[in-house]
């Protein structure tokens, strides 16, 4: 499987340090994510996992260190100076620890909004509604429908986001992220608040997406059943740096991981 080839990373972090006042949220973090892999990032609360996503997506700027995105077309894109919009345009999409949908928009509208960041016509075209803009909008709508249909929300396209059951709101967040056609999908605790059945469905969704859309997934998650079930590689973080890295089997056997994290409960 391509995901196991460590010599072909989609993402490389080198010595990334982030400080908030006196707190070192990331402490020289270095890691690689294999192209095509489902890779998990686990660790206790406050370990710096979400901070790492915020650095990747242009929300925080590291005090030192480098982040490189290799989308697969031969380019190596430094991420640390890009704005969130530019990061999305380069091919990285994310979901948030707390659901961030537009509650009073429909399921379809939530996905369409995400598509707009990839539109070529821009604001002027949208105002003039010229033929290229109209064609792009039609294509976006078709693509959004197709994604929703394929990934389990085809029956709810006209439902308001707030009326979806919680598990489907989480699903919609993921589908919305896909609308930007990412090469790297970042999921921040996608199973939070889900019941066992919904978590199982989520595992299926993550695998299906990875297999069908030729992307890589980096997953922050506390649900160890999900992590061990879907990941090919796992990085364990504590106090802003990795303390272990390996396959699910290796991580479950690692004494330091058990002491720092798995042992807690
Ligand atoms: N914007 C911020 N301002 C101040 N401290 C922050 C900020 N974001 C994160 N932190 C701190 O950085 C540390 C890591 O947080 P976070 O990345 O959210 O951890 P995790 O996602 O692993 O639970 C915590 O001590 C947290 O309080
Ligand atoms: Mg977090």
Image (tube, helix red, strand yellow):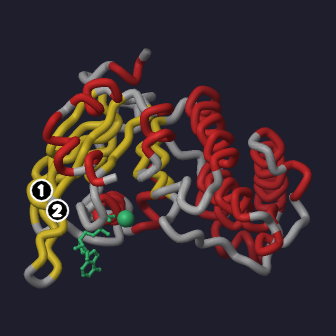
| Quadrant in which residue 11 is drawn | top left
Work out which quarter of the rendered image holds the N terminus and state it: top left
Residue 87, image quadrant = bottom left
The disc at residue 26 is 2
Residue 124 visible to the viewer: yes
**For mark 1, what is the residue?**
65
Residue at image point 24% right, 41% down: 12
Q: Comparing marks 1 and 2, which lies closer to the viewer?
A: 2
Residue visible at 35% across and 71% down? Answer: 59
Give x and y (percent) for residue 73.
41, 31
Q: Earlier in the sequence, mark 1 or mark 2?
A: 2
Query: Is mark 1 in CB contact (under 8 Å) with mark 2?
Result: yes
* Beta carbon at label 1 within 8 Å of ligand 1: no
| Tag 1 secondary structure | strand
- State which quadrant residue 131 falls in: bottom right
Question: Which secondary structure lies at badge 2?
Answer: strand
Residue neighbourhood size for the residue with mark 1, other residues' Cα within 10 Å, grouped as few (<14), some (14–19), many (≥20): some
* Whether residue 172 is situated above or below residue 6 in the rendered picture: below
For label 2, being within 8 Å of ligand 1 is answered: yes
Tell whether 251 sits left or right of 72.
Answer: left
| 118 is higher (above) or lower (below) than 227 | below
Across and down, in percent, residue 88 comes to 48, 57
Q: Who's the residue at 32% across and 24% down the image? A: 249
Compared with 236, 34 (above or below) is above
- Farthest residue toward the top? 1
Side (left or right) of 91 relative to 126: left
Indicate left or right for 141 with 95 as reference: right
In the drawing, what numbered circle is on residue 205? none
Q: Residue at x 77, y 61 (%)?
A: 133
Reply above or below: 19 against 11.
below
């Amino acid at each position: 499987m391509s995901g196991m080839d460590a010599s072909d990373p989609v993402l490389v972090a080198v010595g990334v340090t982030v400080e908030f006042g006196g707190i070192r949220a990331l402490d020289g973090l270095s890691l690689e994510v294999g192209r095509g892999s489902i890779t998990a990032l686990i660790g206790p609360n406050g370990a710096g996992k979400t901070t790492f996503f915020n650095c990747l997506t242009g929300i925080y700027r590291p005090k030192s260190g480098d982040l490189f995105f290799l989308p697969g077309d031969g380019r190596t894109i430094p991420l640390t100076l890009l704005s969130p919009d530019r990061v999305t345009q380069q091919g990285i999409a994310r979901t948030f620890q707390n659901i961030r949908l537009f509650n009073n928009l429909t399921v379809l509208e939530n996905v369409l909004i995400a598509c707009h960041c990839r539109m070529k016509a821009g604001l002027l075209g949208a105002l003039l509604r010229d033929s290229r803009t109209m064609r792009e909008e039609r294509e976006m709508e078709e693509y959004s429908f197709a994604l929703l249909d394929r990934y389990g929300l085809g029956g709810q396209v006209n439902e308001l986001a707030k009326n979806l059951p919680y598990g489907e709101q989480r699903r919609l967040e993921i589908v919305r992220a896909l609308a930007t056609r990412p090469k790297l999908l970042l999921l921040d605790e996608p199973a939070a608040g889900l019941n066992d059945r919904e978590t199982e469905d989520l595992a299926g969704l993550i695998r299906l997406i990875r297999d069908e859309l030729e992307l890589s997934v980096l997953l922050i998650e506390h649900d160890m059943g999900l992590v061990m079930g879907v990941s090919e590689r796992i990085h364990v973080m504590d106090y802003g740096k990795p303390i272990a890295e390996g396959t699910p089997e290796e991580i479950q056997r690692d004494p330091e991981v058990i002491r720092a994290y798995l042992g807690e409960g």
